Amino acid sequence: EDQVTQSPEALRLQEGESSSLNCSYTVSGLRGLFWYRQDPGKGPEFLFTLYSAGEEKEKERLKATLTKKESFLHITAPKPEDSATYLCAVRAPNSGYALNFGKGTSLLVTP
Amino acid sequence: DADVTQTPRNRITKTGKRIMLECSQTKGHDRMYWYRQDPGLGLRLIYYSFDVKDINKGEISDGYSVSRQAQAKFSLSLESAIPNQTALYFCATSGDTDTQYFGPGTRLTVL
């Protein structure tokens, strides 16, 4: 049973067209939700960690929010360089500090 | 210089061969992880280690073994490689916080 589900699988935006990526989770007793960015052929790059419902974090054009069942990654006025796969992960119960990852959302921003 | 390095970056091998993937880190972190990434399946945990004397199986450890030679080094071995082990392999580390930092990855092809 998937603990982390990301949607949509792929998203194409025009430059400047704001949107949101979704990450829903079924883990009880969340001990951390993580967002990463991954460029093709490279390792995931850390973006944000959220711990409690209502928490928000921002970095440049990205803003991550958390509720009790899901997290959103809002992208405001995206640029082509924001094109990447965005991964969501939660701390896995019974696995210490290991992470359970979703399958990711592939974002393409066109000029 | 990168904080988490992986060698080799690319490897092509044949079915039945033994292969070792190596990971080194200069971040001073105690916790290290090995993941594999397959198209459509996301990142899956193979093994993790919280210190030199502590090694744990992850979600998909069958067919793999690991060695934690020192705090900074964590190796993944495929004793007898098979084609469905063709994937991208990532090493990650974490320290006092939950955040995991990933290496650049090793692309392994088993013919």
Image: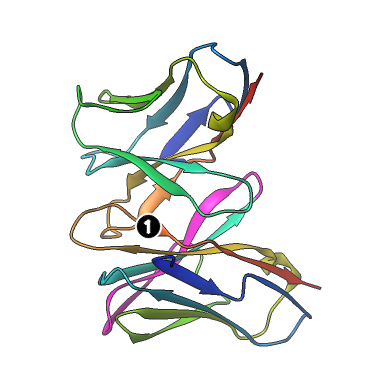
- In the rendered image, residue B40 lying in the magenta stretch gets the answer yes
Quadrant of residue A60 within the rendered picture:
top left
Magenta range: B39-59
* Residue drawn at the location 37% of the way across and 33% of the way down: A25
Looking at the picture, tell me which residue is in the foreground, B74 or A53.
B74
Q: Is residue A96 left or right of residue A11?
A: left
Q: The residue tagged with tag 1: helix, strand or loop?
A: strand
Q: Amino acid at mark 1?
A: Tyr
Q: Which residue is mark 1?
A: B101
- In the rendered image, residue A82 lying in the magenta stretch gets the answer no
Q: Chain of mark 1?
A: B
Callout 1: few (<14), some (14-19), or many (20+) C-alpha neighbours within 10 Å? many
Percent of width and height locating residue B81: 69, 79
Quadrant of residue A108 within the rendered picture:
top right
Percent of width and height locating residue A96: 26, 60
* Residue drawn at the location 20% of the way across and 26% of the way down: A55
Percent of width and height locating residue A6: 49, 31
* Residue drawn at the location 39% of the way across and 66% of the way down: B3
